[in-house]
């Protein structure tokens, strides 16, 4: 058991049913899912985490001053998705700022998000209303800042394991 507070990673008031814990090569990252603005996407990330889809998946696109992208558990290079169908966009008024987690999608199709997501290093107002906000990093932005940069990075950092906080024992 990782203690009642999941190893001290969950901030006070965090809902463990809507919080993801990512064990990455540089450390732990905790993401509060925004099921209030993107319920379909929140359910998808939890489903894939429970299926083990994200385990050992690289951060395949990490652009300094912009974002770190991961979630291609099919190919690991940004071209794949999951066995589940693509999701309809759930755009909101939540702005893309440092620590926001957004869903990546294929090309210019709004309704093509599947499994890949990105974490913002800095503000990205140009993404507002164009991509689904799925969550926000509530612990571990210092870890995100340590991710190796590149498209793809040499020897990329990885998600070792991603779990729904309520499932962590």
Image (cartoon, rainbow, N blue to C red):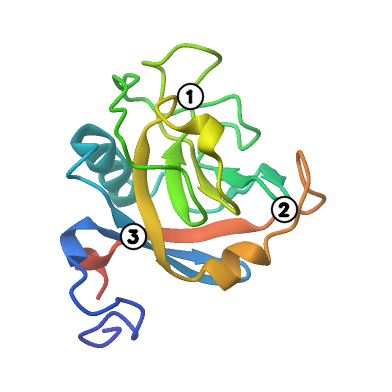
Q: Position of residue 124 (x, y in %)?
A: 56, 41
Number of residues whose C-alpha sits closer than 10 Å to that of mark 1, classed few (under 14), some (14–19) or many (20 or more): many
Q: Which residue is mark 3?
A: 163
Neighbourhood count class around disc 2 (C-alpha, 10 Å): few under 14, some 14–19, many 20 upward: some
- Say which element carries label 3: strand
Q: Residue at x 32, y 22 (%)?
A: 89
| Residue on which the image places disc 1 | 105
Q: Is residue 54 visible?
A: no
Q: Residues within 10 Å of mark 3 (few under 14, many from 20)?
A: many
- Asked if residue 132 is positioned above or below residue 66 in the image, the reply reads above
Is the N terminus in the top left, top right, bottom left or bottom right quadrant? Answer: bottom left
Residue 84 in view (yes/no): yes
Residue receiving disc 2 = 156
**Mark-to-mark CA distance, 3 and 2:** 20 Å
Note whether 99 is above or below 90 in the view shown: below
Is 126 on the left-hand or right-hand side of 152? left
Please give the name of the residue rendered at 22% of the width and 33% of the height, measured from the top-left corner. 40
Which numbered disc, 2 or 1, marks the residue that appears first in the sequence? Answer: 1
Looking at the rendered structure, the secondary structure element under dot 2 is loop
- In the orientation shown, which residue stands out farthest toward the right? 154
Q: Measured from the top left, where is residue 81 in percent x and y?
A: 47, 27
Which of discs 2 and 1 lies nearer the camera? The answer is 1
Looking at the image, tell me whether mark 3 or mark 2 is earlier in sequence order: 2
- Specify which label sits upstream in the sequence, 3 or 1: 1
- In the figure, is residue 46 to the left or right of 95? left
Decide which of 18, 50 is in the foreground and name it: 18
């Amino acid at each position: 058991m990782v203690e009642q507070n999941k190893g001290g990673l969950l901030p006070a008031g965090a809902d463990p049913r809507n919080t993801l814990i990512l064990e990455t090569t540089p450390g732990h990252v905790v993401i509060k899912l925004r099921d209030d603005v993107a319920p379909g996407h929140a359910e998808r990330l939890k489903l894939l985490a429970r299926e083990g889809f994200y385990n050992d998946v690289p951060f395949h696109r990490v652009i300094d001053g912009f974002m770190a992208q991961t979630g291609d558990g099919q190919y690991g290079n940004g071209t794949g998705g999951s066995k589940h169908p693509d999701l309809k966009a759930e755009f909101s008024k939540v702005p893309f700022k440092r620590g926001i987690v957004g869903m990546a999608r294929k090309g210019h199709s709004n309704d093509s998000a599947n499994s890949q997501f990105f974490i913002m290093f800095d503000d990205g107002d140009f993404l507002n209303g164009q991509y689904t906000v799925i969550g926000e990093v509530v612990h571990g932005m210092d870890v995100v800042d340590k991710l190796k940069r590149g498209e793809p990075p040499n020897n990329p950092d990885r998600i070792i394991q991603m779990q729904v906080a309520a499932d962590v024992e």
